[in-house]
C-alpha cells in the first residue's frame, strides 16, 4: 500500500515509514526535512519488503522469473488439456475391442499350430 500523507490540518509533520525521512507541510506543500536525511531506516521486522533498491530489483527479477516459469507450465498444461479434449474415446475403445478380438484369434491359431506340431512329432 503506498504511503499517504496525513491531513496537514491535523498533522503537519510525518515520518515516512519506509525511508525514515521526516516530511513537513510548508506553504501548501509537503517537503522533506534535510536535518533528518540520515535518519535510520525502520527495522525490516515490521515491514518485510524494506530493502535497499537493488535488493528490491533483485526480488522483482526473481518474481518475474518465477512468473515466467509458472506461465510456461500453465501453457503446457493447457496444451495437454486441449489434446485430451480432442481425443475421441469412442474410437479408442473401438480400437481396443478390435485389438482384443485379434489377440484372442491369434491365441486360438497358436494353440492349433502347437497341436499340429505335436501330432507331426509323434
Image (cartoon, rainbow, N blue to C red):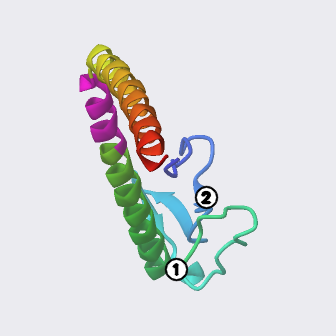
Relative vertical location of residue 4 with respect to residue 67 in this rendering, above or below = above
> Secondary structure beneath disc 1?
loop
Give the residue number, with chain letter if any, for mark 2: 14
Residue 83 colored in magenta in the image: yes
| 89 relative position to 50: left or right | left
Q: Quadrant of residue 36?
A: bottom right
Q: Residue at x 69, y 71 (%)?
A: 42
Residue 37 point in image, percent of width and height: 54, 81
Most foreground residue, 89 or 24: 89
**Residue on which disc 1 sits:** 52
At label 2, counting other C-alpha atoms closer than 10 Å, the crowd grade (few under 14, some 14-19, many 20 or more) is some
Q: Position of residue 21 (x, y in %)?
A: 56, 71
Q: Which of the numbered marks, if any, corresponds to residue 98? A: none
Element type at mark 2: strand
Q: Residue furthest top?
A: 90
**Residue drawn 52% across the image and 73% down it:** 33
Residue 94, horizontal then vertical, whole percent: 31, 16
**Residue plotted at (69% across, 70% down):** 44
61 left or right, relative to 86: right
Vertical order, 99 against 67 (above or below): above
Instruction: Give the prevailing secondary structure in the magenta stretch.
Output: helix
Foreground mark, 1 or 2, reads 1
Q: The magenta stretch spans which residues? A: 77-87
Q: Is residue 33 left or right of residue 60?
A: right
Nearest to the observer: residue 93 or residue 19: 93
Q: Residues within 10 Å of mark 1 (few under 14, many from 20)?
A: few
Marks 1 and 2, the one that precedes in the sequence: 2
**Residue 32 against residue 119 in the figure, above or below:** below
- Residue under the image location 27 percent in, 39 percent down: 79
Q: Which image quadrant is residue 74 in?
A: top left
Amino acid at each position: 500500500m503506498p504511503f499517504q500523507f496525513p491531513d496537514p490540518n491535523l498533522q503537519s509533520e510525518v515520518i515516512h515509514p519506509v525511508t525514515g525521512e521526516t516530511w513537513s507541510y510548508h506553504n501548501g506543500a509537503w517537503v522533506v526535512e534535510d536535518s533528518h536525511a540520515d535518519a535510520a531506516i525502520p527495522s525490516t521486522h515490521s515491514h518485510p519488503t524494506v530493502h535497499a533498491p537493488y535488493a528490491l530489483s533483485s526480488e522483482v527479477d526473481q518474481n518475474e522469473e518465477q512468473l515466467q516459469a509458472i506461465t510456461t507450465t500453465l501453457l503446457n498444461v493447457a496444451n495437454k488439456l486441449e489434446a485430451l479434449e480432442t481425443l475421441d474415446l469412442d474410437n479408442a475403445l473401438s480400437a481396443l475391442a478390435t485389438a482384443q478380438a485379434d489377440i484372442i484369434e491369434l491365441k486360438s491359431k497358436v494353440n492349433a499350430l502347437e497341436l499340429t506340431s505335436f501330432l507331426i512329432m509323434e
